[in-house]
Image (cartoon, helix red, strand yellow):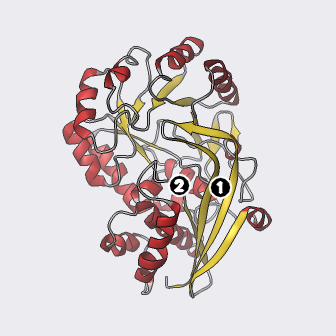
Amino acid sequence: MKIVKAERIACQLPLKQPFETSYGRLTEKAFDLILLTDQDGTVGVGELVAFSQPDYIEETLDSARTVISRFLLPLLTGEIQHPRDVWSLFQTVQGNFMAKSAVETAIWDLYGRQNHCSLTSFYPSTRDKLSVGVSVGIQATTEELVAQVADYVAQGYQRVKIKIKPGIDLEPLATLRQAFPDLLLMADANGAYEDQPEKIVALDELGLAMIEQPLKIRDLVGHRRLQQQLKTPLCLDEDIRTAEDVAVVAALDSCRAINLKIPRVGGITEALRIVSACQQYGLEVWLGGMFESGVGRAMNLQFASQAPFHFPGDLSASDRYFYDDIVTEPAIIEAGSLKVPIGVGAGFTLDEKKLADYCVSRHRLLG
């Protein structure tokens, strides 16, 4: 492969309803598509999912755009034999994992399209459909939360994750557990309990599948102390960027599970390393989402079709969040499962008309 052209398409998809977490409220998802063209004319597409504000992690949409255009694309001037080479090329740029992922996944998509095969053919073992979960934001009342969860259960979602923060935690979760005694239920704090770990301990008798990122990022010792007090497994999200991070949290016993998000770790190559590390250290690994459009969602479904991913991930149907999508075949839940896309590359086809509807701007970055 030799990249001769790069383009950025900025898009915005309005959410069907606001999504609230402990650190903010989202009403629409802004994202970029990164289109890379090989000298043979093949185009690969990656999705830049960084948020506009540095509240989830330190990267933002604007900062990632700068890193892509000024530092990452200039590293792609030579021949690329395999997408794994991109991971090595990008090691000279520190951090900026979401920027790296947008470019690296575009290369993977391009490689699959050139070889007329799905990316699943590069993974050790895969399934054709996945049991999936859904993430539910903080609601105005517990009654609204219960009604929303009941709707998702009726649709067939097999695991429900509830966003929590201090003051909105024990009561709604206890009510949900009473209403759905057999539901695979978990809580996600997004680091909101830095000074109140005892409130997390209070959730230990609810039979939760796991509690995700209760303490602030990089408080691995605090997570270790908290895990020692709990029967419920802790899951880390924002703290995990590399396979080496997995080795550290395993050595400390800071958690029992990892929420793996491909954009947060810099792309598919590092994500595969993290899956291997989780298996080596006996940690549960499952795939999370970042409000991706059909582009990133298709890639996620393909990646999560691998055997180690048996815990239902945050891979909801497209219509869970959006009225519309920019691909011709949005993900649709059927009997509690989502089909793994089987098309070439990451398995999606852009819908040019819808892309035009939701496009904010287009910029040539290279060529």
Q: Is residue 164 visible?
A: yes
The numbered dot on residue 209 is: none
Query: Which percent across, then down, holds residue 258?
Result: 37, 41
> Amino acid type of disc 2?
Phe
Residue identified by numbered label 2: 51
Q: In which quadrant of the rendered image does the C terminus lie?
A: bottom right
Residue identified by numbered label 1: 294
Query: Which percent across, then down, holds residue 294?
Result: 65, 55
Asked if the residues shown at circle 1 and circle 2 are in contact, with their CB atoms under 8 angstroms apart, the answer is no
Q: Which residue sits at x=37%, y=31%?
A: 193
Describe residue 119's horizontal placement relative to residue 248 as left or right.
right
Residue with the most extreme left position: 251
Query: Which percent across, then down, holds residue 213?
Result: 38, 36
| Few, some or many residues within 10 Å of mark 1 (<14, 14–19, 20+) | many
Q: Which residue sits at x=55%, y=21%?
A: 183
Dot 2: element:
loop
Q: Quadrant of residue 216?
A: top left
352 vs 13, nearest the viewer: 13
- In the image, residue 34 sits, relative to residue 315, either above or below, namely below
333 vs 360, nearest the viewer: 360
